[in-house]
Image (cartoon, rainbow, N blue to C red):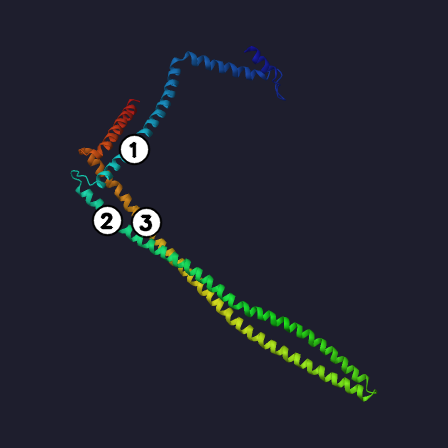
Amino acid sequence: MREFLENIFANQTPPPGSSEGLPYWTFWLLLCVIFLLVIFIFLRDKDLRRRINLFLFGAKKKLIKLRLQARLKREYRKKNEITRNLGKKVWEDKLKIPKGEKIYQELDKLEQDKQDLKHESEDVHSKIVGLEADHEKFVQKHTDSLTEQKSAMNPYREKMAEIKDKERLLEVEVTEKQKELEGFIRGINASKNEADDRQEELKKQTEEMDEAIKKLVDKRLGLERERKDHREKLDEMDKKLKAIDEGGKKRIREFHKEIKEWKRNNEKLLEKIEHIEKKKDPLFMRLGKQTDETREQHQELSVFYSQIDRSNERIGELEQQIKNL
């Protein structure tokens, strides 16, 4: 101990401005002395030690009590569950219990209401299944109708593309013919002073070229009219396609809305059924307590009686332990 204190005090350095006549380690020495005095007083004062022990024992006792109370609550819950199951067993097996007629009537009424709701829920579920099947069939039919309409439009689109290709070729051919015609005209102008036979030949070629260009133009106009007819037919079919698509989507939305509504109704029915089941619990509890009090001798109930007796025994032990604390 001495060496330990010497090592501590040897490492202490006085702060700046401290008095040279009062070493800094004096504070730590006094602190150690006070600490030793406190320990000495504690060891000598039996009353202080007793109060501390009582305080610690009280805290431990309180903790034990809390644990016992938690176990007691669990045991009561377990007993209530057994009692409820006892009442449910009595009602399900229609066992004769003194003064149980009124409870039977209430439970029978709840069960009838539950069965009515279950039948209604089954009908609603069947409706939902039917609607979902109809919806699936309609979606498939709608998809097939769109595919069929698109397929019917394809030949017109292909024909339109073919006509456009022919028009481009005719345009190229007309352009070339026009260039040739211009060449013939320039040749006529240049050969005014030449022989008449040469001019006559050029004029003849010019007329033939002009006639050829005219035929090509007429052919192109015919293609334009044909393309226009196909375009009008395509526009008409496209309107029909959009009408099919919009009508189908509208019907599909109606299916979704109707199915959603029926599902919402079914959820409400299931909630009512669950609520009825919860209303049965206190009646099962009453019937179970009444059966436990009378201890009607039925072989089917002996297991429940034994479980309740064991639970009562544990509850009694726990309550006694709490009382003895």
Task: Assign a secondary structure to mark 2.
Answer: helix
Amino acid type of the residue tagged 1 in the rendering: Lys
Q: CA distance from mark 3 to mark 1?
A: 28 Å
Q: Is residue 150 above or below residue 12?
A: below
Q: Could you tell me which secondary element the residue under label 1 belongs to?
A: helix
Q: Position of residue 223 (x, y in %)?
A: 61, 76
- Mark 3: which amino acid? Leu
Kindly indicate the quadrant of the structure image that contains residue 16: top right
Q: Earlier in the sequence, mark 3 or mark 1?
A: 1
The disc, 1 or 2, on the residue closer to the chain's N-terminal end is: 1
Which residue bears the numbered disc 1?
78
Q: Residue at x 28, y 44 (%)?
A: 277
Residue 151, given in percent of the width and then of the height, sits at 51, 66
Q: Residues within 10 Å of mark 3 (few under 14, many from 20)?
A: some
Q: Which mark is residue 112?
A: 2
Within-10-Å neighbours for mark 2: few <14, some 14–19, many 20+: few
Q: For this rendering, which residue is in front, 178 or 256? A: 178
Type of the residue with mark 2: Gln
